[in-house]
Image (spheres, rainbow, N blue to C red):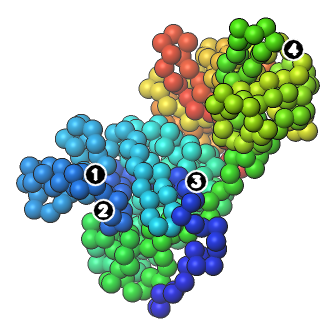
């Protein structure tokens, strides 16, 4: 096949050097995630000289004659000793076309919770599979998590093609199985790429041994995939973080981060959960008055009326405010080794607000093999995905997660020791 001579970047001015793509890598143990990220950084010339020298030194100490690119991302001593990724490793790099924030997440099932962290802000997920093993349970789990977190773009990277003699039928069979599974989850966009991270095939440079593949390399796809809309495109949502009272008796400001939308001086707003409506009297940014604030800017709002507003309240547009509620139906991924059980009392943290809550019901748990719901499991153990019904002590102004990642997500916290138990997304999923 003839490789295409143009890319989306050549015709789409939106894909420019000023755009930023947040991506996460995921996959099972030993699928080659760290090596892939290392290859991507090395071949795109995004590694500093001293970093490269340190990796060369570490590789020699391990008795390796060639550069171990996985050491570029396996930064913890325990990771290097065990040869696995434990923590989420964030890497920042850029090409002439685009800037990137990359989260290399662990593959071991014990650290699936860290994949939730890495993918929670990602716009693209690269899910690796070993060409020798194909789609395994961790592949399905990571794909389900990416879907729950509403990651808009998913790339299947079939790695270690050099170990299956670069056979097209092997790639085609894995791609077909994964595409069918991802489509049943409702993944909006799936791209499949055969590659060898160790040899560098189709990572940054096209493969000379897979001429049957005519698509983009991984880097080409990352550089040209459309970036999601900016946070300022959404409806205004401003969780109050701190109330500021100066020595002047007339000054009362509400500090926080505008997580979505745009706010202007003179704009009407609604304060939730009270439901009172007022006008934005002024906006201060970095101590200076401004006329407009755009997400994700941190600012201080001054309102026309003196209202009872405290940390955790939400300032929103009166045209499309969320409805405060004490009853939440959500999809969750349980993260803690201690199970989550029906009747359990927890703390629920939503934006800047923390309230007491109780797990009223766990209606179902997702079976990863066939995506069927297991009814009334009674509890969720670590890495389980399930539905929960929560009752909170105070009303919360939440949006469906499908509409807003920021105001549709929450954490369940152990009230005894403050540890994070569960990551939740308000609303039901579309695939079970």
Residue 7: x and y in percent read 55, 79
- The residue identified by callout 3 is 123
Q: Are marks 1 and 2 in contact (CB under 8 Å)?
A: yes
Q: Are marks 2 and 3 in contact (CB under 8 Å)?
A: no
Helix, strand or loop under label 3: loop
Q: Are marks 3 and 4 in contact (CB under 8 Å)?
A: no
- The residue identified by callout 2 is 42
Q: Are marks 2 and 4 in contact (CB under 8 Å)?
A: no
Helix, strand or loop under label 2: helix
Q: What is the C-alpha distance between the residues marked 1 and 4? A: 54 Å
- Residue 179 seen in this snapshot: no
- The residue identified by callout 1 is 72
Q: Which mark is residue 282?
A: none
Q: Nearer the viewer, residue 187 or 40?
A: 40
Residue drawn at point x = 28 percent, y = 51 percent: 72
Residue 232: x and y in percent read 73, 46
Residue drawn at point x = 59 percent, y = 42 percent: 366
Residue drawn at point x = 56 percent, y = 29 percent: 422
- The residue identified by callout 4 is 306
Q: Is residue 47 left or right of residue 158?
A: left
């Amino acid at each position: 096949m003839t490789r295409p001579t143009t890319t989306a970047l050549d015709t789409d001015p939106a894909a420019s050097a000023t755009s930023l793509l947040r991506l996460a890598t995921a996959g099972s143990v030993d699928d080659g995630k760290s090596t892939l990220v290392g290859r991507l950084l090395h071949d795109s010339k995004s590694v500093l000289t001293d970093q490269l020298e340190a990796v060369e030194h570490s590789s020699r100490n391990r008795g390796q004659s060639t550069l171990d690119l996985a050491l570029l991302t396996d930064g913890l001593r325990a990771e290097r000793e065990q040869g696995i990724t434990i923590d989420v490793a964030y890497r920042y790099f850029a090409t002439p076309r685009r800037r990137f924030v990359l989260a290399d997440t662990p593959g071991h099932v014990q650290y699936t919770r860290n994949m939730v962290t890495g993918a929670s802000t990602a716009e693209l997920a690269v899910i690796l599979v070993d060409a020798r093993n194909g789609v395994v349970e961790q592949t399905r789990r990571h794909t389900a998590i990416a879907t729950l977190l509403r990651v808009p773009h998913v790339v299947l990277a079939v790695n270690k093609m050099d170990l299956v003699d670069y056979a097209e039928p092997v790639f085609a069979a894995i791609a077909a199985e994964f595409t069918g599974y991802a489509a049943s989850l409702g993944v909006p966009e799936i791209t499949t790429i055969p590659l060898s991270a160790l040899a560098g095939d189709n990572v940054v440079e096209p493969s000379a041994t897979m001429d049957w593949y005519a698509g983009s390399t991984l880097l080409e796809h990352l550089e040209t995939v459309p970036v999601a809309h900016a946070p300022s495109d959404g409806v205004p949502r401003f969780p109050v973080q701190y109330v500021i009272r100066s020595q002047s008796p007339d000054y009362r400001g509400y500090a926080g981060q505008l997580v979505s939308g745009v706010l202007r001086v003179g704009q009407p707003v609604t304060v939730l959960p009270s439901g009172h409506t007022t006008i934005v009297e002024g906006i201060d940014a970095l101590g200076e008055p401004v006329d407009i604030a755009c997400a994700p800017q941190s600012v201080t709002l001054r309102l026309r009326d003196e209202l009872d507003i405290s940390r955790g309240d939400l300032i929103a547009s009166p045209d499309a405010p969320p409805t405060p509620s004490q009853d939440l139906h959500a999809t969750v991924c349980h993260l803690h080794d201690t199970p989550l059980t029906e009747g359990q009392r927890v703390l629920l943290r939503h934006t800047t607000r923390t309230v007491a809550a109780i797990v009223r019901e766990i209606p179902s748990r997702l079976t990863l093999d066939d995506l069927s719901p297991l009814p009334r499991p009674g509890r969720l153990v670590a890495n389980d995905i399930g539905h929960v019904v929560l009752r909170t002590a105070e009303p919360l102004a939440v949006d469906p997660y499908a509409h807003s990642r920021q105001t549709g997500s929450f954490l369940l916290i152990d009230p005894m020791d403050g540890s994070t138990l569960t990551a939740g997304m308000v609303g039901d999923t579309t695939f079970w």
